Amino acid sequence: MKFEEYPLVVPSLEELSKEYEKLIAKLENAKNADEQINTFRQVIKFDDHVETMFTIISIRYSLDTTNETYAHAQDVMDEVAPQLQVYSEKINKIMLNSPYRKELEDAFGTYLFKQLELALKCFDAKIIEDLQKENKLVSKYDKVMAGAKIKFNGQTYNLSQMGKFTTDVDRNVRKKATKAVAKFFEKNHEEIGQIYDDLVHVRDNMAKKLGFKNFIELGYARLGRLDYNDKDVANYRKQIQEVFVPIWVKLFKRQMKRIKIRSPRFYDLGLNYLTGNPRPIGDAHFLVEQARTMYKEMSKETGEFFDFMTENHLMDLEARPGKQGGGYMTYLAEYKSPFIFSNFNGTSGDVDVLTHEFGHAYQGYCSRNIKVPSYRSPTLEACEIHSMSMEFFAWPWMDKFFGENADKYRYAHLADAMMFLPYGVTVDEFQHFVYEHPNATHTERCAKWREIEKKYTPLKNYKGFDVYEEGNLWLRQSHIFQTPFYYIDYTLAQVVAFQFLVEMHKNQPRAWAKYNRLCKMGGKYPFTELLSHAHLRNPFEDGSLKKIARPLNKILRSFDDQNM
């Protein structure tokens, strides 16, 4: 089936509840282990059905937030989804307290039961109303951001579409475009700040109702973090500060020298070369066709999968009014189909989507036959390994997308990835402050953001942009609103993906075989255990970042970036 043929069904709480109640009764009254195992398999099948129904709604709404039918379905889902967690809680308790627990663990694995125990800590019927409020607030934020109409050079653009202007070779264009975007935040920062304040209080309230000290503990539990905690993350941020902040400073200065800027402003960060950033040499259709060739040549599996995605219309790539910003991959379990969403804007980021989101989708495809839903995909920091590593595996084909500027892309891709790490931990440290101090005002939050930003990216200069100098830049980072504490996962995954790049330079077939094995493992293990099984270095271990940084600097030095 093509995506447009997937039915949009507005969920009925009554109908879904009846089916869950039947399954729970059957699970509860099972007369032996085999009967309970078979019933749990039925639960899994129905969970996949419900999840797919919700995912279709979410995708369609993100494709057009102005569509009343989709908006209504999204509103209903925001109400219904939290109420269904009551049934998940009952099922989890039956499984955990089953007299056939040993047989169940033999059938489904011990890790599943650790996940169920964690899920129980994250939910109680008394927080249903809070979960509904949280959903509605996130949807409200998404709508405000998707509704941005930015006037620039006589045209109207959304936030994603403005990206190409903020990387323009003409400094005046960059500055003017950045001003236009800043005006949106000057006008809306109080409203967006209030949405976030409401979210923080709802989340803090939920955490305390559930017996957690604060939302940090609940946030980590919701992300399935069984094998590390906030102290491990704080030590990891310290390593980033020690190892990668000096690299950030060095690369920043090198970049400004390259583009001949003596008094850099933050809007100069988007330009990598005086001759202009490498841009794709064709439109969206051209890029898709080049990607088709690339994936056919990369491996038999990737070629078949790319054809599956295009033939079934499982990618929506171009920016347009009313479409949500950003990019994502999601999975439709009932159809064993990933879906890729993005906002092409004519920059190298368009190629990143065809590699990054495709890496996510490829892993989903590799794990599509794993029966236990929570084993199909790992926790989020491990998910990002698949996507970021695929970006590097695509390097040999960059000539197809960028022509003679392929090396410009490769150098900028690696340098930007290394410079991203300090920003990524800025987002994370900021969120820890927020949820440790839930009653801080919007002004205090912004001041803290700016303080943390100076610590990790010390040369950023917002002169002439008061809204950003006051610390409002974080308002455009959707992850802060949608999925608290997720953003650090990008940095953890990036550090692991760097290992694949280094391995590629030594032995590409061996690196690809290791990557494929990782994709096929899905989420059968927690993050650090998954790394161990895949023979990859753990970013949390002291000294690991230094060992990873050394060969990366060597790869960077192989490019003559000053003459690009």
Image (cartoon, rainbow, N blue to C red):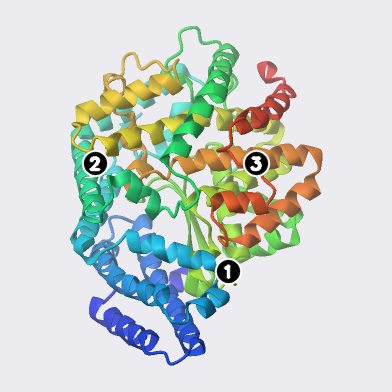
**Looking at the image, is mark 1 or mark 3 earlier in the sequence?**
1
**Looking at the image, is mark 3 or mark 2 earlier in the sequence?**
2
Q: Is residue 105 visible?
A: yes
Alpha carbon separation for disc pair 1 and 3: 27 Å
Q: Is residue 345 left or right of residue 201?
A: right
Percent coordinates x, y for residue 90 in the rendering: 32, 74
Local SS, label 3: loop
Q: Is residue 398 visible?
A: no
Kindly identify which numbered label has been placed on residue 196: 2
Relative height, residue 516 to residue 91 (above, below): above
Disc 3 versus disc 2: nearer the observer: 3
Alpha carbon separation for disc pair 3 and 2: 36 Å
Quarter of the rendering containing residue 5: bottom left
Disc 1 versus disc 3: nearer the observer: 3
Crowdedness near tag 3: few (<14), some (14–19) or many (≥20) residues, C-alpha within 10 Å: some
Local SS, label 2: helix
Q: Is residue 247 left or right of residue 536?
A: left
Q: Is residue 228 left or right of residue 150?
A: right
Residue named by callout 1: 368
